[in-house]
Amino acid sequence: MDAFYASVELLRRPDLKGLPIVIGGRRAAAGMGPEPLSTYAGRGVVTTCTYEARAFGVHSGMPMMKARALCPQALSLPLDFDEYRRYSRLFKAAIAAVAPTIEDRGIDEVYIDLTELPGDTRTIAGAIKERVRAATGLSCSIAVAPNKLLAKIGSELDKPDGLTLIEPEDLEPLIWPLPAKRINGVGPKANEKLAALNITTIGDLARETPEFLMRHFGQNYGRWLHDCAFGRDERLVVTFAEPKSRSRETTFAEDTRDFDQIAGVLVKLCQQVAEDLQKRGYAGRTVGVKLRYTDFQIVTRDNTLEVAVNDAQAIRRAAFEALARVAPQRRLARAIRLIGVRVGSLSPEGAMPPEPVVWGRTLELF
């Protein structure tokens, strides 16, 4: 979907079309509407923005204060997840009416397997776009390609409202000139390392041997980079997958080293994750905490348990054990701006062993 949250908001506020709009920083409440971004003062991040705001360098994940500096004339809107989820259900149902083999990749993105559908793929893709627009009033961008890797890259080539077809012979003229970071899975650190090796485009990557890439990036990641450069991807469209984890996090209004304040927030997050798991019928064996410092450095610590858990007390105990490894004697070396808790290695609750959790020691943190 094209700038999904922002596009949903513009359906409700058509008078804002054509303006730079930034979505994020706060949750919607009764009576809340657009506000000048120039008046924003907080620690939230940009969830999405209109293409007019992107022209000023604003992008998802950016601190709202930085977005304000780049585009002070923009308007900010609060997040309304209930409405976004409603539109998400609508667009996915519209796609399923045309092509039912769908892999859900989150609130605004899907992979669709067209292999068994009769007819021309461009016609099918056009029908999907028409169905989505009729059901939601929103536009989407589609790439039809031999595999998920190329489809993901291609879906970004002609936004908004794009329709891109990628054939194997398009690899060199269409894909190789793109930046290497366009490959989904090449993050900032990997991209920085590639740049240090004078590899800036996907074509540069294709010119290197597998042995060279494995020497610098390890056997698995190096081999994967080489495969990506040549458009190779054997992943299937998966119509159902068990969830891997549930997490919650929050950003403090001000950076803090106050352990009591941090502990109080962590207790609430553990309760929220426990409720999420119980609602969905899952439990997990790995409990971890995440801290983001003032300089945006992230530290995580995990605890692996003997049995899967989904009750707040067990999650809280494991989370505080993990926190104690970062903050011995209840002291943090640096102030933090964000804390989160995650429960991973999930399994259906019915698969949980009946034995109670046995803890080796009790910490005074509780």
Image: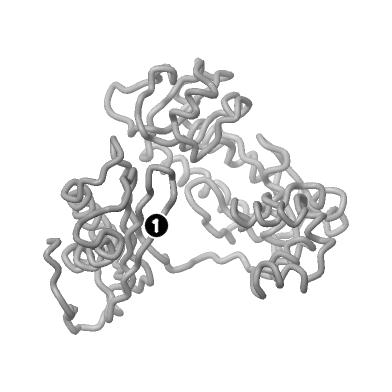
Res 208 → quadrant: bottom right
Residue visible at 34% across and 32% down in the picture: 26
Q: Quadrant of the C terminus?
A: bottom left
Q: Quadrant of the N terminus?
A: top right
Choose between 346 and 207: the one closer to the eye.
207
Q: Position of residue 116 (x, y in %)?
A: 70, 65
Residue visible at 23% across and 55% down in the picture: 331
Give neighbour class at mark 1: few <14, some 14-19, many 20+ (Cα, 10 Å). Answer: few
Q: In the drawing, does residue 93 fall left or right of residue 211? A: left
Q: In the drawing, does residue 74 fall left or right of residue 269? A: right
Choose between 282 and 190: the one closer to the eye.
190
When the figure is inspected, residue 14 is found, relative to residue 176, above or below; the finding is above
Residue visible at 44% across and 24% down in the picture: 12
Secondary structure type for disc 1: strand
Q: Position of residue 154 (x, y in %)?
A: 72, 48
Q: Position of residue 265 (x, y in %)?
A: 22, 49
Q: Position of residue 262 (x, y in %)?
A: 22, 49
Q: Which residue is mark 1?
A: 299
Q: In the drawing, does residue 116 fall left or right of residue 11? A: right
Choose between 363 and 148: the one closer to the eye.
363
Q: Amino acid at mark 1?
A: Val
Residue visible at 63% across and 68% down in the picture: 236
Q: In the drawing, does residue 36 fall left or right of residue 103? A: left
